């Protein structure tokens, strides 16, 4: 098993699963640079509305950490998940390449990694939303147009602007917001049927079908984003319990590792554990027990 918490840059291609960016332009030139995986504040760099000279400085910021655990597959050491954290633009993203392409000899992980890298590139090119901040749907549209790899992927891009969390979501990756020991928001899942998510790709869906989300957040809120490898194996109440249990020392790296490893443990329990996936399977007329083995990507971001 391989877990990644450190980003690697290789001529602007994903060498690994994650990318954390303090300065996107510098990162583009820094081939082979490995950045520290220690906890970092997601620093905000003020941006001006393209139609105004006014500079918008938000009152809230995010602090984040992430991890990816690829499922062990011969010939696919990096798995099919991808994600990024952009500190400068207060934006995170996750994507999950659709595994069904493997039957055609296609590695959908190449699509998800290219989609997320193109999302990172589009952050500095796209006009801001009215009132400042990133427009996640435009970022996704820009990335989608420039992604040429074979395959398809779910995608979720979340950004903080002032006290608003904005998101664009396609498929069954997503996020939830925890406040005062409870879930106050969860992004809806887009599926055509059981285990058949909406997905971006050539000949598949496009960003016009994404759910556009806006939610007001407060200092102390915790955002948990991930692919279905997380949310199929860990229910909302269990996520809240883990976040509450591990929040005392404020170590986000510890929290994200703990949560990802619980998801991994649940995914390998094929007999006794009741999971969101087993519940959904039963409702779809396909009764089964236990979790679902899959790549697992988790991002935890604290609003401060």
Image (cartoon, rainbow, N blue to C red):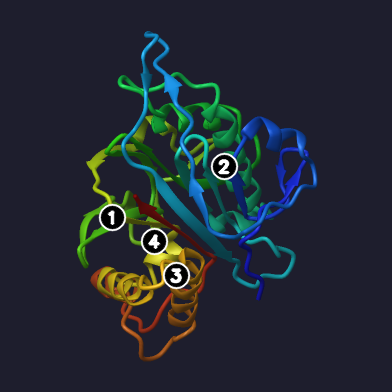
> Residue 268: where, in percent of width, then height?
49, 83
Tell which circle, 2 or 4, labels the residue nearer the N-terminal end: 2
Marks 1 & 2, CB-CB < 8 Å contact: no
Look at the numbered disc 1 and give the secondary structure of its residue: loop
Tell which circle, 1 or 4, labels the residue nearer the N-terminal end: 4
Q: Which quarter of the figure is the N terminus placed in?
A: bottom right
Is 113 drawn above or below residue 74 in the view shown? Answer: above
Identify the residue position indicated by label 2 in the image: 116
> Residue 96: where, in percent of width, then height?
51, 53
Gap between marks 2 and 4, in whole Å?
22 Å
Is 297 drawn above or below residue 148 in the view shown? Answer: below
**Lateral position of residue 235 relative to residue 115, left or right:** left
Label drawn at residue 255: 3
Which residue is located at x 28 percent, y 70 percent?
A: 240
Gap between marks 2 and 3, in whole Å?
24 Å
> Residue 13: where, in percent of width, then height?
72, 42
Marks 1 & 4, CB-CB < 8 Å contact: no
Which label lies toward us, 1 or 4? 1
Is 74 or 159 nearer to us in this picture? Answer: 159
Look at the numbered disc 4 and give the secondary structure of its residue: loop
Query: Which residue is farthest bottom?
Result: 272
Residue 67 position by quadrant: bottom right
Look at the numbered disc 2 and give the secondary structure of its residue: helix
Label drawn at residue 221: 1
Tell which circle, 3 or 1, labels the residue nearer the N-terminal end: 1
Which residue is located at x 72 percent, y 38 percent?
A: 12
Tell which circle, 1 or 2, labels the residue nearer the N-terminal end: 2
Is 192 drawn above or below residue 12 in the view shown? Answer: below
Marks 2 & 4, CB-CB < 8 Å contact: no
Identify the residue position indicated by label 4 in the image: 195
Gap between marks 3 and 4, in whole Å?
28 Å
> Residue 19: where, in percent of width, then height?
61, 48
């Amino acid at each position: 098993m391989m877990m990644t918490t450190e980003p690697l840059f290789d001529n602007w291609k994903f060498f690994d699963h994650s990318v954390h960016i303090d300065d996107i332009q510098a990162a583009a030139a820094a081939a082979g640079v490995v950045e520290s995986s220690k906890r970092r504040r997601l620093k905000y760099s003020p941006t001006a509305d393209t139609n105004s000279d006014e500079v918008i400085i938000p009152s809230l910021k995010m602090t984040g950490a992430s991890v990816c655990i690829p499922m062990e597959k011969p010939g696919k050491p990096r798995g099919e998940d991808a994600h990024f954290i952009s500190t400068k633009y207060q934006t995170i993203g996750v994507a999950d390449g659709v595994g069904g392409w493997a039957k055609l000899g296609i590695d959908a992980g190449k699509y998800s990694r290219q989609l997320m890298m193109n999302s990172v590139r589009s952050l500095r090119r796209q006009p801001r939303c009215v009132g400042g901040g990133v427009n996640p749907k435009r970022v996704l549209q820009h990335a989608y147009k420039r992604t040429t790899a074979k395959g398809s992927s779910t995608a979720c891009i979340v950004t903080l602007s002032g006290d608003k969390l904005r998101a664009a979501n396609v498929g069954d990756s997503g996020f939830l917001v925890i406040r005062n020991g409870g879930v106050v928001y969860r992004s809806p899942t887009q599926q055509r049927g059981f285990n058949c998510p909406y997905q971006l790709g050539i000949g598949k869906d496009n960003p016009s079908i994404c759910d556009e989300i806006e939610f007001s957040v407060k200092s102390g809120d915790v955002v948990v984003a991930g692919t279905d490898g997380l949310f199929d194996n860990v229910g909302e109440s269990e996520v809240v319990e883990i976040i509450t249990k591990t929040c005392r020392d404020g170590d986000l790296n510890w929290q994200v590792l703990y949560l990802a490893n619980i998801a991994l443990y649940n995914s390998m329990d094929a007999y006794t554990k009741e999971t969101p996936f087993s519940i959904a399977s039963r409702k779809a007329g396909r009764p089964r027990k236990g979790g679902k083995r899959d790549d697992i990507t988790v991002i935890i971001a604290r609003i401060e």
